[in-house]
Amino acid sequence: MRKKLKSAANYSDVVLIGAGVMSATLGVLLKELQPDLKITIFERLDLIAGESSEAWNNAGTGHAALCELNYTPEKPDGSVDGSKALKIYDSFQLSRQFWAYLVEKNILSPEDFIQSVPHMSFVHGEKNVSYLRKRFDLLTQYHVFKDMLYTENPEEIKNWIPLVMEGRDANQPVAATYTDAGTDVNFGNLTRMLFDHLKNMDGVKIRLKHEVTDLEQLEDGNWCITLDNLATKKRNKKKIYTSFVFVGAGGGALPLLEKSKIEEGKGFGGFPVSGQWLKCNNPEVVERHNAKVYGKAAVGAPPMSVPHLDSRMIDGQKELLFGPYAGFTTRFLKEGSLLDLPSSIKLSNIVPMMQAGLQNIDLTKYLIEQVRQSPEDRLEALKEYFPNARMEDWELLVAGQRVQVIKKDPVKGGVLEFGTEIVAASDGSIAALLGASPGASTAVDIMLKLLERCFKDEYNTEEWQSKLKAMIPSFGQSLISNDELFNQINHWTNDVLGLKSAELA
């Protein structure tokens, strides 16, 4: 750790900004690795996991690239690129191992946050069928995907997902993949359980309704953080000093990164994308569907807008959602301000943001079309996946807010990135997480990378390495390239988390 301000009464070794799954994961990892650390968490809302981590605000898929077609793009030559899918699968397995470790320590209750749900991809039309066949052929070369099934038989697909096939044109070419190895994850419940554990540990303080208004690095390398107490309405009255800051505030991370004034944060911009779901209110319909069914995104659509007909388990009740429908707002958070986007534009990022905008005309067009959608338009989109859907069975809900990363590019001037990115100071004293999907599902992998960059000395010690391997048995190894290790760990996590092993349907 960096030099501590021993004279400061209001000193904390670590400050975590934002009470979402990222801060929760990092906080628990750090306390497992170094129990004597003092950690303080600040959250502007009056509840834990109120933004992107909340179950109603995210897809909860437990992203493992089993069904998400945007992780296996088609190349110009017609072949399929599986590199991102393999990487994401490996990353999600790290999360599963860490959760299983915490279950064995009686910190988590698996039945309250993770369930087995089949993951499926479904397409129609000859071109899309050809693509899905190539995707299946590519992925099943790897042992981690070997139990995936593929069919172009409408009757077989109907057995898996009757709602998707009933009322569909019998002459329409269709194809689907199926695996029992998928999960549904309630990241809101998971986050709350992690914070319940943290708040009972020595040296941990959680402060809700506290908003960080400024960050300043002192000459000795420590940070002074200024806060508003939103409960008492005392502005800029509270200061806290720390050796390390993690900005895990979702869409609110970019403005705080800009306030830090670190060199590494210059040039980053954000493009906010809102979302909406259709929620089924007919219990009979909900019970007839039991899978997460992902399709192909429209041209120009951001990854978070990949359409899916989605079985969920939220607050102990089975739900059925379709969407998300994308939209545009200048807010960076669901509970944010309309001034978030304009106030984030600085001299250092205005060029990258303009260049990224010019290069993503399709995205702009797509979002305009989405914003202009009528209820009838949304129903027609649903009927692509549920031909017999009726308007009266569904209601529209607002989903979470995402901010896609815009960054400098030496060739293009600025590019729009889909995914997550850690931006850290060269001295490792501060790091911010920008971006969106797959986000929460790969939180453990993301936080391990942060530890390696920001806690270099501790990370490389025998003590930390040993503890990391105890928490995550495959730490430092890839399950993609080690069949025996994968089978061993997959069996363990399935057993501890109460999940199904992949089976042939």
Image (cartoon, rainbow, N blue to C red):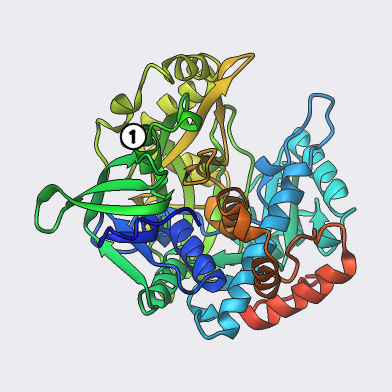
* Amino acid type at mark 1: Lys
Q: Quadrant of residue 417?
A: top right
- The residue that appears at 69% across and 63% down in the rendered structure is 93
Q: Position of residue 193 (x, y in %)?
A: 43, 74
Q: Residue at x 63, y 48 (%)?
A: 168
Which residue position holds label 1?
Answer: 259
Closer to the camera in the image, 211 or 65:
211
In this orientation, does residue 429 appear?
A: yes
Question: Relative to the observer, which residue lies in front, 454 or 49?
Answer: 454
Measured as percent of width and height from the top left, residue 488 is found at: 81, 76
State whether residue 302 is above or below residue 358. below
Q: Does residue 116 sit above or below 334 in this rendering?
A: below
Q: Position of residue 283 (x, y in %)?
A: 43, 70
Q: Does dot 1 land on a helix, a strand or a loop?
A: helix
Quarter of the image holding residue 478? bottom right
Please provide percent x and percent y for residue 457: 62, 56
Q: Where is the C terminus found, in terms of image quarters?
A: bottom right
Question: Residue 237 versus residue 143: which sits nearer the camera?
Answer: 237
Residue occupying the far front of the picture:
7
